[in-house]
Image (tube, grey):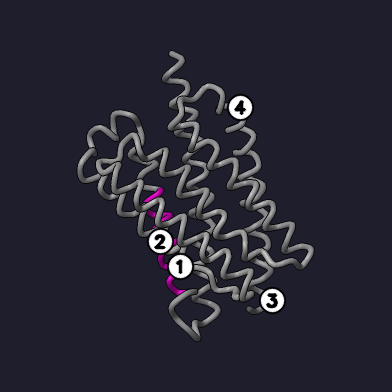
Amino acid sequence: MDDYYLIVADIVTGFITCVTFVLCLINLYLIRKLEKYNKALAIYVILCFLFDFTNTVLIHFNYSNVGLLPLFNVVELILLGVFVSKMNPYPKMTKMAISLGVLINIYEWVHYFNTNDYIINKGRVFNAIFFLTILLSILSKDGEESKGVRTLPLIHVMIIYFTICFIQFVLLDFLVNIPHGSIFITWMLYALAGGVLYTMSTYYLWKNMKTLNM
C-alpha cells in the first residue's frame, strides 16, 4: 500500500483508538448499573478498545496482529449475541449459529498458527451475515418494540456497520488484484463505522441507565 494510505490509516486508527479509550472509561462506569443484556454491550465496547489497543501495540513493534481477528470474532458473536437475544425472534436458531461461528473462528485461528496464512477473513464474513440476518429479522418483526426501548437507532447503526464489514472482508477474502484505493476506501468506511457503533452503543447505554434510574 502507498505511503499516503499508510499515513492516513495510522491517523484514523490512532483517532479511533483514542475515542474508544474514552468510551471504554464511560462503559466501565456504566457497567455496574446495567442489566445483563446491556452489560454484554458495555463489555463489548470495553473489549473493542482492548483489541484496538493491542492491535496498535503489535503493529508498532512489527508483530503480526492477524491472529487477533478470530478471537475478536468470537467475543463479538457471544457478547452482541447476548445483547440482541432480548429482541431476537429466533433464539434457538441463533444459539446454533453462534456455536457454528465460534467453531469457524477457532478453526481459522488454529489454521493460521499451523500454516502462517494471513488470510483469515471467513469468520468476519460469517459474523457480518449472522448479525445482518438477526438485525433485519428484529426490524421486520419487532420494529415497534425496538422503538419503545430506544434501540432502533442503534440497530440501524449496527446494520450499516455489518454491511460495510461484509463488503470489506469479502473483498479481502474472495477477490484478487484489488486496487489499493478501493481497499483503502472500504477500510476507512469500516473503521469509521466501528467508531460510530461504539459511540452509539455507549450513548444508548447511558440513556438506558438514566431511564432506569428515574
Amino acid tagged 3: Asp
Q: Residue at x 51, y 69 (%)?
A: 185
| Residue where numbered disc 4 is placed | 29
Amino acid tagged 4: Tyr
Residue 151 percent across, percent down from the top left: 36, 36
Amino acid tagged 2: Phe
Residue 192 percent across, percent down from the top left: 52, 55
Per the model, the C-alpha gap separating discs 3 and 4 is 39 Å
**Quick check: marks 4 and 1 in contact, CB under 8 Å?**
no
Q: Is residue 164 left or right of residue 198?
A: left
Secondary structure of the residue carrying numbered label 4: helix
- Marked residue nearer the N-terminal end (3 or 4): 3
Residue at the outermost bottom position: 177
- Looking at the rendering, which quadrant does residue 35 occupy? top left
- Marked residue nearer the N-terminal end (1 or 3): 3
Q: Nearer the viewer, mark 1 or mark 3?
A: 1
- Marked residue nearer the N-terminal end (4 or 1): 4
Q: Residue at x 46, y 45 (%)?
A: 78
Q: Which residues are magenta?
A: 158-171
Residue 123 percent across, percent down from the top left: 46, 62
| Badge number at residue 3 | 3
**Quick check: marks 1 and 2 in contact, CB under 8 Å?**
yes
The answer to whether residue 118 is magenta is: no
Per the model, the C-alpha gap separating discs 2 and 4 is 32 Å
Per the model, the C-alpha gap separating discs 4 and 1 is 35 Å
| Residue where numbered disc 1 is placed | 122
Residue 147 percent across, percent down from the top left: 29, 33
Crowding at mark 3 (Cα within 10 Å: few <14, some 14-19, many 20+): few
